[in-house]
Amino acid sequence: MTPDVTLPIEGGFVRPLREADAHPGYVNGLNDPVVNRFLDAVKATPQTLESVRAFVAADASSPSSVLWGVFAAGREPHVGTVRLHGIEHRHGTAHIGVCLFDRGVWGQGLGGRAIAAVTRWAINSLGLRWVEAGAYEGNTASRRAFESAGYHWVFDIPGKYLFEGQPTTVKVYAARP
Ligand SMILES: CC(C)(COP(=O)(O)OP(=O)(O)OC[C@H]1O[C@@H](n2cnc3c(N)ncnc32)[C@H](O)[C@@H]1OP(=O)(O)O)[C@@H](O)C(=O)NCCC(=O)NCCS
């Protein structure tokens, strides 16, 4: 989906991305091992402008996804993404993921505020009742960002997923109205 909406957040804004928003900084950030350390699918294959364009286009046309760009005030182009996906109207649920691929904006609370804005939109505009995020146990920044956006821990998945070759725990968080 590509809803025509811009959500202001402190220090920037978020809006749905279109294929033309793919840019070299986005691609290079996704290939940065510090950025993609906890991003399983992203680092599975090297990202290119073509692969990123295809990803953005697929979400833009999917009825069950909205890929939001995170824009920092006074900076173009976007510095990260918040992705709502697996939107399931029958249950009123969705999944959410976040990536600030520009490390220059880390540590300012932008990630948490972007998650909070997209979550509010999902609850208020799509009528969802459960927005779910999973984070590797060791990804403290991600866990804290979701908690600061109002997410609560709901359950753990111990040992199912591998992190750097070792079974690890994925912590699952949810936001509800
Ligand atoms: C996770 C991410 C979105 C966080 O965004 P951010 O805007 O930098 O986060 P914030 O500035 O709100 O920081 C969140 C909290 O984590 C803390 N934190 C940040 N980096 C940390 C680190 N390496 N270790 C421990 N705590 C850390 C911050 O101090 C802050 O704590 P607070 O809530 O008590 O103030 C960003 O780091 C990112 O995109 N990482 C790469 C992709 C990724 O891992 N995505 C999540 C996959 S589940």
Image (spheres, rainbow, N blue to C red):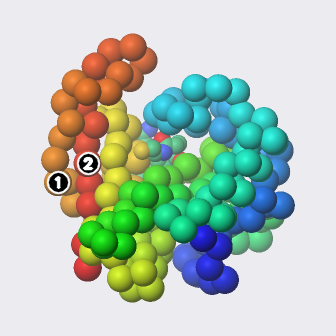
Q: In this view, does 83 lie above or below 44?
A: below
Check disc 2 and report the residue beneath it.
172
Q: Is residue 42 above or below residue 116?
A: above
Q: Which of marks 1 and 2 is nearer the N terminus?
A: 1
Query: Helix, strand, or loop for circle 2?
Result: strand
Front residue of 52/12: it is: 52
Q: Which residue is drawn at 33% across and 46% down?
A: 134
Q: Residue at x 42, y 76 (%)?
A: 122
Q: Which mark is residue 38?
A: none
Left or right: residue 45 versus residue 139 is: right
Residue type at mark 1 is Val
Front residue of 81/84: it is: 84
Front residue of 114/92: it is: 92
Dot 1 and dot 2 residues touching (CB under 8 Å) = yes
Label 1 Cα crowd, 10 Å radius (few <14 / some 14-19 / many 20+): few
Check disc 1 and report the residue beneath it.
154
